[in-house]
């Protein structure tokens, strides 16, 4: 593979390196077997390179064996495969979703899959070659249904984010991407407990919006933003008051979002 022009002149195409090296104790003697030796400068230069590569090769009588080169010990392991797969991926470019400790696992998993574009939106289905007509947003019909559209740009989503911002008494939730949306809680100026609450509320809102969207698509149940918001408040309260570090918060404090 390295010297195709030499290989084309080799008389025995099945020869191995050991056939071309005779070890004389003091060093290797190279014994070539060309079909027709050439004085072409390209041939001579390739031959010099090849000779210097094999000059130091030690050929033993041992049986040949496979060696897994990424591992220094030469043995194959899943760990080294993983290392090879991630070696080219710069860690700073990888988005790692912060798991919210107090929301149900299904809500975390939904956001994680949403960020990776692994939920079955119209655009995703089209990309997966599932043909269901135009991939339009079933909520507004004004654009293709991608995760960015459905959870950020869609009119329904913006009303939800506006309402949640004013309920939580934080600046308007405004994101360019799902990564932004999932990380917004870190940017707000608030106590740690409030940040923790906002993180989970955003995840629950995405999950509730997706449920409402599915109810519309599969059961023809009309989208009602007020219903989505009450669900976010109720599920949020249930989880936050029982699973977070701030157990015991009452409904009044949760609904008004003061003293958080
Ligand atoms: Zn829409």
Image (spheres, helix red, strand yellow):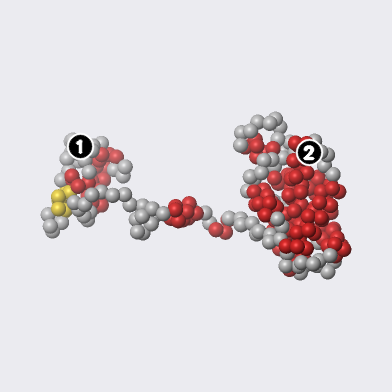
Name which residue lies at 77% across and 40% down. Answer: 215
Comparing 224 with 41, the one in front is 224
Name which residue lies at 68% across and 59% down. Answer: 100
Evaluate whether residue 45 shows in this view.
no
Q: Where is residue 236 in the image (x, y as percent from the top left)?
A: 78, 57
Name which residue lies at 75% across and 45% down. Answer: 211
| Side of 9 relative to 94 (left or right) | left
- Decide: few, some or many residues near mark 2? Use Cα within 10 Å; few <14, some 14-19, many ≥20: some
Comparing 140 with 216, the one in front is 216
| Quadrant of the frame with the N terminus | top left
Which residue is the site of mark 1? Answer: 12
- Dot 2: element: helix
Evaluate whether residue 11 shows in this view.
yes
Report the disc number at residue 237.
none
As drawn, 2 above or below 56:
above
Q: Position of residue 89 (x, y in %)?
A: 52, 54
Name which residue lies at 65% across and 37% down. Answer: 125
Report the disc number at residue 216.
2
Q: Which of marks 1 and 2 is nearer the N terminus?
A: 1
Comparing 188 with 76, the one in front is 76
Q: Report the Cα–Cα distance between label 1 and label 2.
A: 71 Å
- Dot 1: element: loop
């Amino acid at each position: 593979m390295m010297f195709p022009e030499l290989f084309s002149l080799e008389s025995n195409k099945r020869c191995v390196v050991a056939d071309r090296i005779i070890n004389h104790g003091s060093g290797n003697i190279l014994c070539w077997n060309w079909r027709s030796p050439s004085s072409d400068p390209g041939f001579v230069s390739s031959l010099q390179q090849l000779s210097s590569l094999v000059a130091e090769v030690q050929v033993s009588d041992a049986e040949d064996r496979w060696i897994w080169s990424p591992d220094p010990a030469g043995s194959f392991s899943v760990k080294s495969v993983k290392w090879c797969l991630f070696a080219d991926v710069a860690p700073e470019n990888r988005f790692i979703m912060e798991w919210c400790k107090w929301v149900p696992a299904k809500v975390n998993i939904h956001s994680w899959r949403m960020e990776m574009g692994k939920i079955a939106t119209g655009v995703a289905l089209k990309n997966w070659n599932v043909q269901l007509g135009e991939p339009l947003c079933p909520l507004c019909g004004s654009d293709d249904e991608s995760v960015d559209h459905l959870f950020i740009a869609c009119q329904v989503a913006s009303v939800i984010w506006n309402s949640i911002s004013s309920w939580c008494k934080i600046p308007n939730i405004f994101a360019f991407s799902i990564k932004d949306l999932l990380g917004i809680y870190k940017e707000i100026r608030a106590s740690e407990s409030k940040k923790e609450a906002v993180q989970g509320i955003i995840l629950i809102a995405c999950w509730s919006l997706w449920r409402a969207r599915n109810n519309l698509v599969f059961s023809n149940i009309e989208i009602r933003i007020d219903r989505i918001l009450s669900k976010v408040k109720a599920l949020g309260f249930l989880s936050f008051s029982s699973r977070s570090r701030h157990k015991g918060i009452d409904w009044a404090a949760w609904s008004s979002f003061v003293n958080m």
